[in-house]
Amino acid sequence: MINQINKKIDTLIAKDEIGKSLDFIRDFIEFNIHLETTNDWKNEILLLNNNLNNLKSQFRRNIIDSRDWEVRKNRIINSLLELKSDIFRQLKRSQIKIPSYILDTIEIHLPKMIEVKGGSFKMGGIGGMVDEVPSHLVTLNSFSIGKFPVKNIEFTLFLNSNKVEEINNIIALNKETTLTSIESQIIEKNGEFVCQSGKENNPVVYVSWFGAKEYCKWISFLTNETYRLPFEAEWEYAAKGGRESKKYKFSGGKNIEDVGWYEKNNLGEPSECGQKQPNELGIFDMSGNIWEWCEDWYDEKYYEYCHKQGIVKNPKGSVYGTFKNLRGGAWNDKEFDCRINSRGAHTPSKKEDYYGFRIVKE
């Protein structure tokens, strides 16, 4: 990621947009006030900007000729390049934050988000397992949720940009998979994590709940916004289409074949995101393909507790537990398991070739 930002600055300089490159670096530094030398860098950029503006003024007023302009401008560029090298040397040893407008100007893969307007809905329902009843009324505030599950290309960015410790707690790579499982679609190669060719836009799997949480922490730090896993109620509300819900059994339709990958149509592994029909809000893959980790603890009796409360506002799940909620069903599951109301759960350290996640932004 640092290389991509570096490249952006070099491109601005090459286009003779020195002022823009200085503004770009200044904004970037102001977003990283946790770095020790931030104030020194800001002062240097202020000085360079002043020098540049004075030079431009002199050139416009014909105080200096074109030759003098080029010589003095190149001195400013050289100083800028030295400053940039110093900044990026130190950034490579630190965690960095990036303003959202900068993220929009560089080639970077961050999850696309869909706004889900707050409202009330009936959670759970009959026709399923015992933990899906009784249905109860839930009211939620607005939030945004991933248009797709987090993809391999997005998760490798996290693995390569962050000094990930105890990676075995986060994701299982090829060396840890069993003969009965598919291969991990992320591999370690020459000290870097890369996606297997053609698998970049598949949902990341073999991720534990802890790994999903670490990704949320990283993207929150990176963007200075709050990202997390969805609470189970948020997940179900979004899957049902929020205010636009047509009360389908599956997310986006009555027929699982149209909206999701499951045991009868899978390709032997998780499929590329977004290949099936989206739901009412334009969200893909919430029925089938992968089970998705949720923020809260699983409790078989939690719906009974909520039902007794009447209308529950922004439920956060059980206070404690052994298992974390999983929702959505997977590529190797039966149609029954891919219903919106279907609930799953496992220990937060579990990693499977059908466990992934999507994120929520508050």
Image (cartoon, helix red, strand yellow):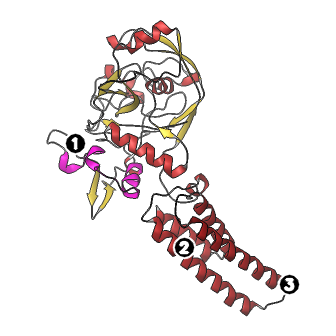
Residue 165 part of the magenta-drawn span: yes
Residue 48, quarter of the rendered image: bottom right
> Residue extending furthest left?
179
Label 3 or label 2, whichever comes before in sequence order = 3
Name the residue at 31% across, 36% down. 355
Q: Which one is nearer the viewer's eye here, 187 or 165?
A: 165
Q: Which residue is mark 3?
A: 61
Q: Which residue is mark 2?
A: 84
Residue 356 point in image, percent of width and height = 35, 38
Query: Given this view, does label 1 or label 2 mark the residue nearer the observer?
Result: 2
* Crowding near the residue tagged with mark 1, few <14, some 14–19, many ≥20 C-alpha atoms within 10 Å: some
Answer yes or no: do the residues labelled 1 and 3 have beta carbons within 8 Å? no
Can residue 336 be seen? Answer: yes
Residue 82, quarter of the rendered image: bottom right
Tell me where the magenta segment starts and ends, as one range. Answer: 154-176
Instruction: Measure how far apart labels 1 and 3 are at the Cα level.
Output: 69 Å
Magenta residues: mostly which secondary structure? Answer: helix
User: Dot 1 lies on which element?
Assistant: loop
Residue 156 part of the magenta-drawn span: yes
